[in-house]
Amino acid sequence: MLKVAYISLPRYLSLPILSSIAKEVKKVGVNFYIDTNEEEPNGVAVPDNFDMTLRINKELVTTAYNSLKSRNVLKTIKSVKILKKHVNARMDFLNPDAIVATSDMGGLVTRLCNEWAVKHNRPFFIMQPSFLEVNPQSIKLRITNKLIYLAFNKVLGVPIGRRQQYANCERKTNYTLLWSGEFSNQMTRKYLENTFSVGNPLFDKFANQKVRIDVKKPVALICTQPYEKLVECGILKPYQALEMIMMLTQAVQQNPDVHFIIKVHPSEDDNDYIKIFGGRYGSNFSITKTGDLTHLLNTADVQVSMASYTSFEAVVAGVPIIILHPEFMKFFNQFEGIGLTAKSTHEFNACLNFLLQPYPRQLFSENRRKYLNKKLSYFGNSAETTANTIKKVVEWRKKGFK
């Protein structure tokens, strides 16, 4: 019987995709969810489609991360090695045939599990969770990251650093599961030998989705992003973050006949948006942080973001999209040929009114089909394809298990 273990970080992004894979794997095996305790608990003992949850000791995880923050080298080495011993013992107990994660670059427990997989010759799969763009980094930061990797990972045997900034390229022995070959261009060429195009299991449910052509009572879904954190990361400038907030409030105020649902990013505080919008509910907008995105997309006629994975989800769900200020993130270019762009509130209003008309929505429907043919392999059968790929790789590798 196939035994597969899963690691979801960040949980809000990864767990829905991994759960979709687990549902299919359940037909031929069992699924184990590894709670790394690197995020706040969500109160769910065993997530849907998993047979058991294995938890990593929270105290050991916290101690390791606090040591990293303190920059005490000796303390960091000691705490990570203690955590590593614990993780190895838990993985030995679980003894999975394969491990599936959505990154091999972090967090710390994921790297330790990856090390266990290499030592025991178990396949480690990385399922593409979102887009694979690489945020621009300064030369200083690149050098710093490289030195940390060489010093800790290579010399001291403590895997706390990432080897490079490209996604899913830490170990050439790992297997990468991409939505389509279109995304292989965003990876380092030498790491494509263990890459499979399997689609996105989460989107199978949208395979027969149709675009709503006639709009009666228009609803626009705004998906926010952590603009202040993007400033801290150097991706946005402070004035750009402020411009985004101003544009969102103006969009709501200047379109009173449209109902706006403001979906707050999981890493943001919804109270901030309640204050920004005057603390008013019940006019032409509502604010939610916990609302299910699939349900929200089913009610929306247009979706709005700056450069978010949620806009891709909207296209898959058959909802036209508007991308705000694409010039703020020039390295991001995933919606060419499918999304309208707006660099001002005036442009946004024009785009919104345009996309509420039947002909533009029909045109979007036609473009959507072409766009998804490029972006998603096995649309509608991705979960089955992914599960079969994992199963076949395990069968190839099984004679070498330790």
Image (tube, rainbow, N blue to C red):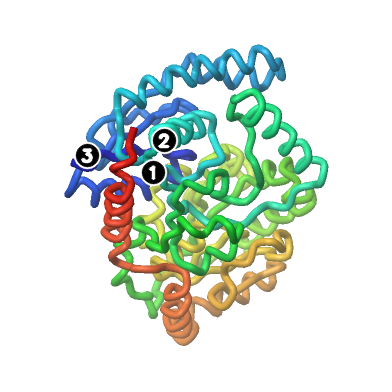
Residue sitting nearer the eye, 223 or 347: 223
Q: Quadrant of the N terminus?
A: top left
Q: In terms of sequence position, does the residue under pointer 1 or pointer 2 come before the other? A: 2
Location of mark 1 (residue) = 123
Q: Residue 279, image x and y in percent?
A: 57, 42
Q: Cβ–Cβ below 8 Å for labels 1 and 2?
A: yes
Extreme residue toward the bottom, this view: 359
Q: In terms of sequence position, does the residue under pointer 1 or pointer 3 come before the other? A: 3
User: Residue at (58%, 29%) from the top-left corner?
Assistant: 159
Label 1: which secondary element = loop
Q: What residue type is labelled 1?
A: Pro
Q: Is residue 252 visible?
A: no
Which numbered dot is residue 117? Answer: 2
Q: In terms of sequence position, does the residue under pointer 2 or pointer 3 come before the other? A: 3
Location of mark 3 (residue) = 30
Q: Cβ–Cβ below 8 Å for labels 2 and 3?
A: no
User: Residue at (44%, 69%) from the top-left corner?
Assistant: 319
Residue sitting nearer the eye, 238 or 15: 15
Residue sitting nearer the eye, 268 or 42: 42
Mark 1–mark 2 Cα distance, whole angstroms, equals 7 Å
Please tell me whether mark 2 or mark 3 is closer to you in this view.
Answer: 2
